[in-house]
Amino acid sequence: MQPLVEVNDVTFGYGAEPVLEDICLHLHPGQFAALVGPSGAGKTSLLKLILGTLQPTRGEICIHGEALNGRPAPCVGYVPQLETVDWRFPVTVEQVVLMGRVRRSGMWPWPSAEDKERVRAVLEQLGIPDLAGRHIRDLSGGQQQRVFLARALIAEPDLLVLDEPTTGVDMRTAENVMHMLADLNQQGMTILLTTHDLNAAAAHLPWVICLNRRVIAQGAPDDVFTVETLNETYQGDMLVIHQDGMLFVQQKPHSHSYHDLMPSPVPGEVPSKLVEAKDGRFASTLSI
Amino acid sequence: MDALLQPFQFEFFRNGTIAAVLVGALCGLIGVYIVLRGMSYIGHGLSHAIFGGAVVAFVMTWNFYVGAGLWGFIAALLINQTVRRTKINADAAIGVITTASFAIGVALISRYRRFTRSFDAALFGNILGVSTQDVLVVAGVTLMAAAIIFFLYKQLLFTTFDSEVAQIYGVKTEWVDTLFALVLAAALIASMQILGVTLIAAALVIPAITARLMTDSFNRMILLSTLIGALTGFVGMYLSYHVDVASGATIVLLQATLFGIVLTITSLQKRAARRLIHTHV
């Protein structure tokens, strides 16, 4: 089968020191994959190489078998990190989503009837049909993520690329985002994302790629998330626990407690009326 | 009634008013992009750079518009490329390139003291000196800017919102940036006679931020900013005749006053809305 994305022996660096070295990756149509690795491992650079906004120093990147050679990747929908968005910019949800149609819509400044219909349909699909007229600042974290996902989907991409979609949102929203992406994947969308949340990746994604300047390992989470691989990726002391058919990854707990770091911490105090209420949650003041 | 219409009997006043309305609208329109991209300083800097170009054009006896235009466009490109290709931030790049260019103008003026032409007009604006040819140039530039913004509306909006992501979605951002630099340089040159180098930045920024306070929609911000620019251009000209104050300064002061009023009203509205929430909770 012809891979959708091929990264062939790619090396890349901003200066003399390479940020990425000898990267080899294939992504097939319908795959759902996560790039994991510590900050500075080159995750975002690799995404930008695949998107075509950065050029490899060595090697080549092919989309649908065709080398990019400095062009932006065709047929890709991109969802940036939420924290890179200028939330004060005067645009409504509809205006943001319409940006995704920039390649396909006509020359007139206003949206066509078809454009408007597509916006309505994609917002409906993502469960936010009533938000079209809202300013982007007046949304919750989950809604913001959906709006930028809608902008990517309306471009009718073959590949969806998301930069840390679970960063900066609360745990429940992150879970929802992952389920939404899994649904999209089930409808045939190829998805590549980066994440710091190894447990979410292990629970939701069938394919993970451990990156730290090089590809340390790639495969199913059960095969890849081993203590050896994770230690090499994160240069740390990692703990992997299999329980009830689930996989948990954690940095190994330290053998010390806060007492070792702070011999005499400033004690907190629970307001006395709460303690008097005899509620178990408000036991007493900190005893040293 | 006659007293009110009196200034319009003079051709210089009619020319000046048409030019002021067009320049106001033009600066209001492109000011939206300038403000939203955080480029306020570039308008200020480029107008100074163009002043250098104007003096060079005069010394070399080139046509003013061609000389100043080329100079401004090259300065804008130099700033763009410096930011793209080096570690230097935009504000520093603008500082170096435009101030050096302005200094060339000043150096030339001090070297060739035999100038017959006064550069006061270029610095502070002189509406009395607006000829029919100048009005035609302003009208042409306004038309060109409106046409480019009209047909590049979607690409410009995306590039202004997030240039890097726009590129990923297939917008040729480098082209969009270059065309916009061209429009900006042309607008600054056309405005120089009317507002003067030192006041152009205000005419670019104030209508746009006033409009921003009034709306959260990009489309409406564009319309409001253009309207505010045109209206303050007209009223400012008229006032300047009656109170006998320099036209550029009158227009800018009028815009600043309007901004103050809108700021006060919107802050009061916000406070009232907050109080409403508190009393209802």
Image: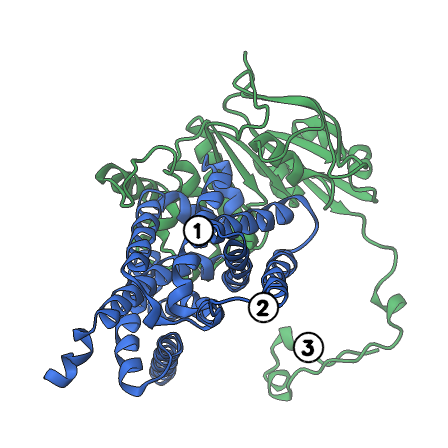
Q: Which chain carries label 1?
A: B
The residue positioned 26% from the left and 85% from the top of the image is B242
Q: Which residue lies furthest to the front in this view?
A: B114
Secondary structure beneath label 2: loop
Q: Name the residue under label 1.
A: B63
How far apart marks 1 and 3 lie (CA) works out to: 85 Å
Q: Same chain for the residues at labels 1 and 3, yes or no?
A: no
Chain drawn blue, letter?
B
B280 lies left or right of B33: left
Amino acid bearing label 2:
Arg
Front residue of B28 and A275: B28
Q: Mark 3 lies on which chain?
A: A
The residue positioned 36% from the left and 79% from the top of the image is B250
Secondary structure beneath label 3: loop
Residue B86 drawn at (x, y percent) = 69, 47
The residue positioned 73% from the left and 39% from the top of the image is A14
* Front tag of 1 and 3: 1
Q: In which quarter of the image is residue A22?
A: top right
Secondary structure beneath label 1: loop
Quadrant (top left/top right/bottom left/bottom right) for the N terminus of chain A: top right
Amino acid bearing label 3:
Ala
Q: Residue A7: in sight, yes or no? A: no
Quick check: B203 above or below B62?
below
How far apart marks 1 and 2 lie (CA) works out to: 20 Å
Residue B113 numbered tag: 2
Amino acid bearing label 1:
Asn
